[in-house]
Image (cartoon, grey):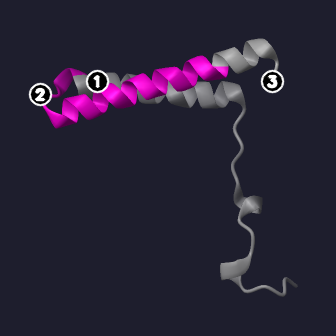
Amino acid sequence: MNARPPSERSDWTDVDLLTREEATERLREEISATEARLGKAEEGAERDLLTSRLRALREAVDDLRTQERAGS
């Protein structure tokens, strides 16, 4: 029996860890979805946010590839 109340228990046991391959696949799916939204977006704040998001997603994929090559 765990002596701590549920609100104070560690949530580390519920962490869903991804492999780099799984993370890359999820990022690529999100890139595709973001590209589709960007294609429909009009000029303005939404388009700027989507462009920024797309850049960040692509950088994350590049970082994962770099880590895979480095064997980290």
Question: Of the numbered discs in the image, which one, if any, rests on residue 42?
Answer: 2
For the residues marked 3 and 2, what is the alpha-carbon distance in whole angstroms?
41 Å
- Circle 3 or circle 1, nearest the eye: 3
Residue 46, percent from left and from top: 20, 36
Residue 21 relative to residue 40: left or right: right
Question: Of the numbered discs in the image, which one, if any, rests on residue 36?
Answer: 1
Q: Secondary structure at mark 3?
A: loop
Q: Secondary structure at mark 1?
A: helix
Question: Of the numbered discs in the image, which one, if any, rests on residue 72?
Answer: 3
**Kind of residue at disc 3:** Ser
Determine which quarter of the picture holds residue 41: top left
Residue 50 relative to residue 2: left or right: left
Q: Name the residue at 68% across, 15% down.
A: 66
Query: Magenta segment range?
Result: 39-64
Q: Name the residue at 56% across, 21% down.
A: 61
Quadrant where the image shows the C terminus = top right
Q: Is residue 15 magenta?
A: no
**Kind of residue at disc 2:** Glu
Q: Residues within 10 Å of mark 1 (few under 14, many from 20)?
A: few
Q: Name the residue at 47% across, 27% down.
A: 57
For the residues marked 1 and 2, what is the alpha-carbon distance in whole angstroms?
12 Å
Mark positioned earlier in the residue sequence (1 or 2): 1
Q: Are marks 1 and 2 in contact (CB under 8 Å)?
A: no
Residue 52, percent from left and from top: 34, 28
**Kind of residue at disc 1:** Ala
Determine which quarter of the picture holds residue 38: top left
Q: Name the residue at 84% across, 83% down.
A: 2
- Circle 3 or circle 2, nearest the eye: 3
Determine which quarter of the picture holds residue 10: bottom right
